[in-house]
Image (cartoon, coloured by chain):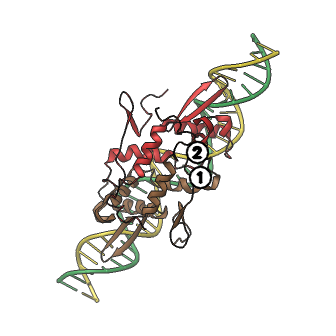
Chain colours: A brown, B red, C yellow, D green
Amino acid sequence: MSNARTLPLLEPDGQGVVPCCPPLTERPFTAEEAETAARMFKALGDPVRLRLFSAVASHAGGEACVCDISDVGVSQPTVSHHLKKLKEAGLLTSERRGTWVYYRVEPSVLAAMGRLLTSPAAGPAGATTGN
Amino acid sequence: MSNARTLPLLEPDGQGVVPCCPPLTERPFTAEEAETAARMFKALGDPVRLRLFSAVASHAGGEACVCDISDVGVSQPTVSHHLKKLKEAGLLTSERRGTWVYYRVEPSVLAAMGRLLTSPAAGPAGATTGN
DNA sequence: ACAAGACATCGACAGTTGTCGAAACACGCA
DNA sequence: TGCGTGTTTCGACAACTGTCGATGTCTTGT
């Protein structure tokens, strides 16, 4: 139903994707950057979704059928609801093959998320590494 | 006020901290791991909080006075509310010096978050790096 | 065509969250 | 001591979120 709401953290640019935001420690986020990045953090901000995402991300082949990962303590409609949220956030993609639906992670998004949190080699806040 | 609610992502272990969770792609999170990690993602899942966090993290000296970062489009009590949330999530610490209160990031927490998202050298889902 | 299984959508509901203004608290200074 | 400024807490309220059971859709097998 939506086609302008996907992949908030990355923007397609023809042959790949470009990250939306600099590392968190580089400079203060603009309102727009924050809106974009927060959507992704929010998607991972629920324990059930995090388990589902982790289950997909760690599954052999990089993809998993819903039936493989739906044992997270909530009902089946709730699992479906959360997978939809993760898809809307651009973290997962889904594909139906026969009876089953397979979800897989968007690898570049995971990389972009890591880049957001990895301090860029002695950033302003990373000067004192010894805690 | 609270002393059992801080640093969800890391556990103090005498001389430093140890990460709570493996990378997301290593194996499915347990319910407990997910609960812990989700608390942190949730804290960054709000645009205002993300801007505040980024403002502190990128500020010279690794710390910032509330007065330096409170221009994010919401009222001052709301800023205080969000800073409290970030503190409860273990992402920020605060210290009062005279009239002003300074916030700084917990560097090890940032590192732990990055580790969560960085695939551990060709993990199950990281085999295909070229999208 | 029909039944069965896998998954998604719908509608409802309790609990949580973000926001504000008002008030309280902490500190420095006259 | 009292005032002004910076920050937090309080109380209230609308909006959002996670959850469920019931139902719908899609595919396979009989």
Q: Give the distance between the C-alpha atoms of the residues marked 1 and 2, in whole angstroms.
A: 9 Å
| Badge 2 amino acid | Ser
For the point 36% across and 74% down, the residue is A96
**Most foreground residue, A113 or A63:** A113
Determine which quarter of the picture holds residue A103.
Answer: bottom left
Seen in the picture, residue B51 relative to C2 is either above or below; the reply is above
Seen in the picture, residue A62 relative to C20 is either above or below; the reply is below
Q: Is residue A85 left or right of residue B52?
A: left
Location of residue B96 in the rendering, given as x and y in whole percent from the top left corner: 60, 25
Q: Which mark is residue B70?
A: none
Q: Chain of mark 2?
A: B
Q: Which mark is residue A34?
A: 1
Q: Is residue A5 left or right of residue D7?
A: left
Secondary structure at badge 1 equals helix
For the point 57% across and 55% down, the residue is A21
For the point 56% across and 30% down, the residue is B94
The residue positioned farthest toward the front in the image shown = A121
* Marks 1 and 2 in Cβ contact (< 8 Å): yes
Q: Chain of mark 1?
A: A
Q: Local crowd at mark 2 within 10 Å, few (<14), some, or many (≥20)?
A: many
Residue position marked by numbered label 2 in the rendering: B54
